[in-house]
Image (spheres, rainbow, N blue to C red):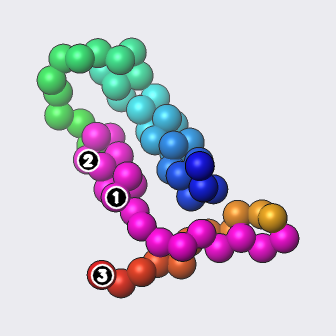
């Protein structure tokens, strides 16, 4: 798993804690801004920038 994927998973897990429904794993259909943000984060693509074995960010690709 790349550093970018690890960072995205970390961000997504933190975001889910902001919504009570998402945090408790409820399967009940609901609409919350956390879900919309999560989808956008999951769709991020780019090349991880690693300097001295440390993740520094992402170089974005224009599509």
Above or below 33: residue 63? below
Callout 1: helix, strand or loop?
loop
The circle drawn on residue 43 is: 1
Residue at 18% from the left image edge and 17% from the top image edge:
28
Instruction: Write down the residue under mark 3.
Output: 63
Q: Residue 30's image quarter?
A: top left
Residue 58 is left or right of residue 53, and the answer is: left
Q: Which residue lies furthest to the right in this view?
A: 52
Mark 3 or 2: the one toward you:
3
Q: Is residue 60 above or below residue 36?
A: below
**Does residue 37 show up?**
no
Q: Give the range drawn in magenta.
A: 34-52
Residue 63 lies in the magenta-colored region: no
**Whether residue 17 is visible:** yes
Query: Which disc, if any, is residue 25?
Result: none
Q: Earlier in the sequence, mark 3 or mark 2?
A: 2
Task: State the CA–CA distance, disc 3 to disc 2.
Answer: 21 Å
- Tell whether label 2 touches label 1 (CB within 8 Å): no
Q: Is residue 24 left or right of residue 9?
A: left
Q: Is residue 58 left or right of residue 29?
A: right
Residue 36's tag is 2
x and y percent of residue 43 in the render?
34, 58
State the image coordinates of residue 36 (x, y, percent, origin top left): 26, 47
Residue 4 location, quadrant: bottom right
Give me the C-alpha separation between circle 1 and circle 2: 11 Å
N-terminal of the pair, mark 1 or mark 3, is 1
Give SS at disc 2: helix
């Amino acid at each position: 798993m790349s550093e970018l994927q690890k960072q995205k998973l970390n961000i997504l897990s933190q975001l889910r804690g902001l919504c009570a429904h998402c945090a408790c794993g409820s399967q009940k259909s609901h609409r919350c801004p956390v879900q919309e943000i999560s989808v956008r984060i999951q769709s991020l693509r780019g090349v991880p920038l690693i300097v001295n074995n440390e993740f520094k960010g992402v170089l974005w690709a224009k599509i």
